[in-house]
Image: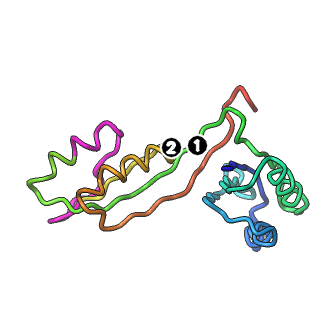
Amino acid sequence: MRRVITCMMNNNPGVLNRFTSSLTARQVNIDSISISPITDRRTSRVTLVVLLKGQQESQQLLAQLDKQLDVFDLKDITDTHHVERELALIKVNAPANKRAELLAMIAPFRASIIDVGSSDVVIQITGTREKVNALLRITADYGVLQLVRTGVAGFTRAEDQ
C-alpha cells in the first residue's frame, strides 16, 4: 500500500540520517523522498513515499518517526486531498528529422524541450507520477539515453490544512 507522508524537521546536520535510519530499522523501503528548506531556512519539509502493508503499519511508522526530537508536524496525507508533483529530465535520442514528431508527442503532457544537441534533446516534465510514467512510455520508442527524477513533493490542499 502506497503511503504519502509529510513532515517538517529542523534543518540541522544529521537529522535526515537519523530520520532515514528509523525507516531502515523498521525495514521500510523508501519509494521516493524529497526534502528542502522552506521560507524559514532553519526548517525543511520532507515528502516521503513508502510502500507499507496497511494502515496499522503506517500508524506504527508515524509513531516511530514522531519520537525524533527534530521532527514535527508529521502527517500521513495519503487519504486526504493533497497535491503531489514530480520533476523528470529525460534525454532522448532525437535526430533532426524526428524532432517535430517528438515535439507533437510531448505537447499533450505540457512537457518542454529544454536542451538540444546534435542528435538528442532533453525533455522536462512536471506532474504526477502517473503523468511522468506515461511520458516515459511515449519516449521509450525514441530511445531514452538518460533519465533523472526528483521524487514526489507534496502537501495537503488549502481546505484540508
Q: Is residue 126 above or below residue 149?
A: above
Amino acid carrying label 2: it is: Thr
Are there few (<14), some (14-19), or many (20+) residues within 10 Å of tag 1?
A: some
Q: Mark 1 and mark 2: span between their CA atoms?
A: 6 Å
Residue tagged 1: 84
The x and y percentages for residue 107 are 28, 39
Q: Mark 1 near mark 2, Cβ–Cβ under 8 Å?
A: yes
Which type of secondary structure does the marked residue at label 2 adopt?
loop
Determine whether, in the image, residue 38 is placed left or right of residue 148. right
**Bounds of the magenta segment:** 103-120
Question: Could you say where residue 31 lies in the image, as x and y percent from the top left?
Answer: 61, 60
Magenta segment includes 132: no
> Considering only vertical position in the picture, is 11 above or below 105?
below
Residue drawn 22% across the image and 45% down it? 103
- The residue wearing badge 2 is 128
Secondary element at tag 1:
strand
Rendered position, 75 above or below 142: above
Q: Is residue 88 left or right of residue 15?
A: left
